[in-house]
Image (cartoon, rainbow, N blue to C red):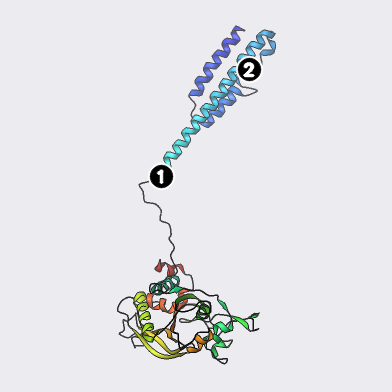
Amino acid sequence: MTALRDDLEKLKGEGLFELQGLETSDDLEAFRHRWLGRRDGRLSAVLQSLPGLAPEERKEIGRLANELKALLETSLSEKTKTLDDARVSAELARSAVDLSLPGSPLPRGGLHPLTRVMEEITDAFLRLGFNLAEGPEIETDDNNFTALNHPPDHPARDAHDTFYLKDFKDEAGRPLLLRTHTSPVQIRHLRAHKPPLYIVAPGRVFRHENADATHSHVFHQVEGLAVDTDISLADLKGALGLFAETVFGRGVNVRFRPSYFPFVEPGAEVDISCTLCRGRGCRVCKQTGWVEMLGAGLVHPNVLRAVDLDPDKWSGYAFGIGVERVAMFKYGVDDLRLFLENDRRFLEQFS
């Protein structure tokens, strides 16, 4: 018994000493098999000799052997954890982030140029005291045409100009339509609010047109309306002059040419001096130095009557600005379709 006890004590010293010198996970696994293996482990050889001992000796040697086994297993676990911690620390040291280095740039988005221009136009009038107004893109014939003084035979009502929704009807049984301009917002607002009022209404509109360099079946407008007492063309000219200066910069001139629109009288086409050639004359402005920018005029008395306003008491002006057209001249883009193709190479120029 004394010899076996001495053997166990010797094994304890050898095992702990050997364990301290191990440096890899493979070494630890080999140690486990060599010392704690069930068949050929060094402790197993001691345990296999227990049946030949007297009962008291077997009990004592078994207890000492199990204590040694538990000690080696605990020490092995601690050594494994120590080596794992050291490995993780080394990996972290190798892959540590140098916070003094510049970071990887992240791609930045930006507003679409049409959105940016529409906001610039809207802001120009909000600063004048206008209020923002909105309306639905699906409209009634009355709001889109009749109340805006379009006669029944007006060509704009034809199916080749307007998208009609034949399966959807208004209260009068007429098909609803995709609005062809933002002017229906005027009618809705005048029916819901009493003047004086000043509104600006940005939005998307639809017309049955073939897409080319200057036309699209979907485009954007900013509608403006002012209704008050004693409004004149001078008020309209002042407001549009500020719009041109805000969007295109100082030095841009504005001129009015007589024109016809059913919902204004008198009506005018509003031109600005060409921003590409600065009024000197170029291919875009056809050597005139001027480019057509928008339509405007004083609100027609029939439009006021359609919303139950007395044209002898109230007057107003209205205008409709094509956002795509403004963007083309603001940024020097000669093809409207570029704004709609979502080509990042084009859009990144405006970020």
**Residue 32, percent across and down?**
58, 26
Examine the image and state in which quarter residue 317 appears: bottom left
- Quarter of the picture containing the C terminus is bottom left
Q: In the image, what residue occupies the spot 59% across and 10% down?
A: 5
Query: Which element type, helix, strand or loop, lies under badge 2?
Result: helix
The label number, if any, that marks residue 97 in the structure image: 1
Query: Disc 2 versus disc 1: distance between alpha carbons?
Result: 52 Å
- In the rendered structure, which amino acid carries the disc numbered 2? Ala
Q: Is residue 81 positioned above or below 52 on the image?
A: below
Q: Is residue 32 positioned above or below 153 on the image?
A: above
Q: Nearer the viewer, residue 160 or 197?
A: 197
Label 2: how many residues lie within 10 Å, few (<14), some (14-19) or many (20+)? Answer: few
Q: In the image, what residue occupies the spot 45% across and 36% down?
A: 89
Mark 2 or mark 1, earlier in chain: 2
Examine the image and state in which quarter residue 65 appears: top right
Q: In the image, what residue occupies the spot 36% across and 85% down?
A: 234
Q: Nearer the viewer, residue 11 or 346?
A: 346
Q: Which residue is mark 2?
A: 45
Label 1: how many residues lie within 10 Å, few (<14), some (14-19) or many (20+)? Answer: few
Camera sees residue 284 = no
- In the rendered structure, which amino acid carries the disc numbered 1? Val
In screen coordinates, is 295 left or right of 53? left
- Quarter of the picture containing the N terminus is top right
Q: Nearer the viewer, residue 289 or 56?
A: 289
**Residue 122, percent across and down?**
42, 73
**Residue 324, percent across and down?**
44, 77
**Marks 2 and 1 in Cβ contact (< 8 Å):** no
